[in-house]
Every structure is written in C-alpha cells, then in structure tokens.
Amino acid sequence: MGRLRQVSKAEASPEIRELYKQFFGERDPVAEPGTATGTPGDYWTTFALVPDLLFQARNSLMALMGPGRVLKPKLRELAILRTGIVGDSRFEYSQHLKVARMVGVPEEKLQAIKGWATSDKFSAEERAVMAATDELVGRNLVEDETFAELKKHLKDEAIMELFYVIGLWRMHGMIVRALHLEYDKDTTARLKEIPAPVAQK
C-alpha cells in the first residue's frame, strides 16, 4: 500500500482520464489496478495528485526514450538498469529489463549486469557508461579517470544526456521508494539500532 492516496478515474480530470486510458484501458486503476507490464500502476495514480507533475514526469521520461537522441538506446538502458541496481529500486530494475530487451540488449548482458565489473560480456564503451553511472548514483560524483574513459567513447552531447538520464531515473526511483509505490513497498527502516541488553543489577 502506498503512503499517499491515489486518484480514482471518477475524480480525475479529462486529461488524466485520457492518460489512464493509455495505461489501464477503460478500468478505474484504483479499483482495478494493473498495467500491461504487470505493475500495479500506482505510480501514475499517485502522481495524479498533482497533475502538472504527472505530465512533466511522463513527458520527460518519454522524451529521453524517444527516437533521435544522441545517447544510444542500449547505453541508456544499461545506465538505467545500473541506476535501479545501485539505487535499490526494484521497480526501475524490473521495468527496464523489459525495455532493454526491446532495444536489443542481449540476454547474456542482462544476466551479467549486476556483476558487470568482473564480467567479460561488455564493451569498453558499455563499461565506461556503467562505471560513471555507479559513481554518480552511489557517490554523487564521477572521478576524473572514469570521466576521461567516458570521453573516449561518447560525444559531449551524449554524456550530457547520459547524466540527465541517470539523474532523472534516480529521482523517480527515490520517489517510488519513499512513497512505497509499485514494487518498492517494503523499504522501511532497513538500518535500525538494536537496543543493548539492560545490565543486570
């Protein structure tokens, strides 16, 4: 169960209802959740609380996945998968395995992506992209050596797109986890102090 209420079809604006139709058909997605890819779909029904943010999110995500981008789709999906892995978003990881297959990332690479650093399945270009992603998500920086390797393979415009993709998907992963949406529902208080035993007198 998400932490915020969801917007039903009945209370949604005509624009939101049209968006719902794209993902849920004629169903009310709150009463009858579920999308074609198997997710509950409560990302959309929760974001609908603030319609302009929902459309901004949809438009920015779709724009980066559309044709004509400088960053190659396969590299984008490897970066998004690593963003989901390092950022601990089950939703992003699961969804973008499907997208990665759609853009032609081989299954052997998808099976190896969690341990990419010790795998021989990836090209130098792919390794540079994943190294930069891991550093940006995990440490909020990209080391000079990592960036220099990235520059060997990608134009400046592609690097700009790459970093925007990483940052945007990281933001959405954080929101999904914080609000307990989609596949990221059991994410509360993983690190917790265990009280010491009370000393006997």
Image (cartoon, grey):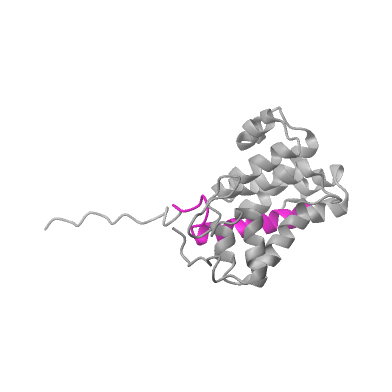
Q: Any magenta on residue 182? A: yes
Quarter where residue 106 is shown: top right
Q: Residue at x 69, y 58 (%)?
A: 167
- Where is residue 111 drawn, in percent x and y? 62, 31
- Decide if residue 51 is on the left or right side of residue 66: left
Q: Total number of numbered labels?
A: 0
Image quarter (top left, top right, bottom left or bottom right) of the C terminus: bottom left
Seen in the picture, residue 115 relative to 182 is either above or below; the reply is above
Nearer to us in this view, 106 or 9? 9
Name above or below for residue 118 compared with residue 181.
above
In the image, 147 versus 42, the foreground residue is 42
Principal secondary structure, stretch drawn in magenta: helix
Q: Is residue 98 left or right of residue 11?
A: right
What residue appears at the point 73 percent right and 62 percent down from the top-left corner? 59
Q: Is residue 3 magenta?
A: no
Q: Which residues are magenta?
A: 162-186
Residue nearer the viewer, 40 or 79: 40
Residue 141 in percent (x, y) is at 69, 55
Which residue is found at the position 81% from the left and 56% from the top?
160
Q: Is residue 59 above or below residue 143?
A: below
Does the rendering let one see residue 140?
Answer: no
Q: Is residue 99 visible?
A: yes
Q: Which residue, as the protein is rendered here, is positioned at the far front? A: 26
195 vs 8, nearest the viewer: 8
Where is residue 188 drawn, in percent x and y? 43, 56
The N terminus lies in quadrant: bottom left
Q: Quadrant of residue 104?
A: top right
Give percent across and percent down for residue 194: 31, 54
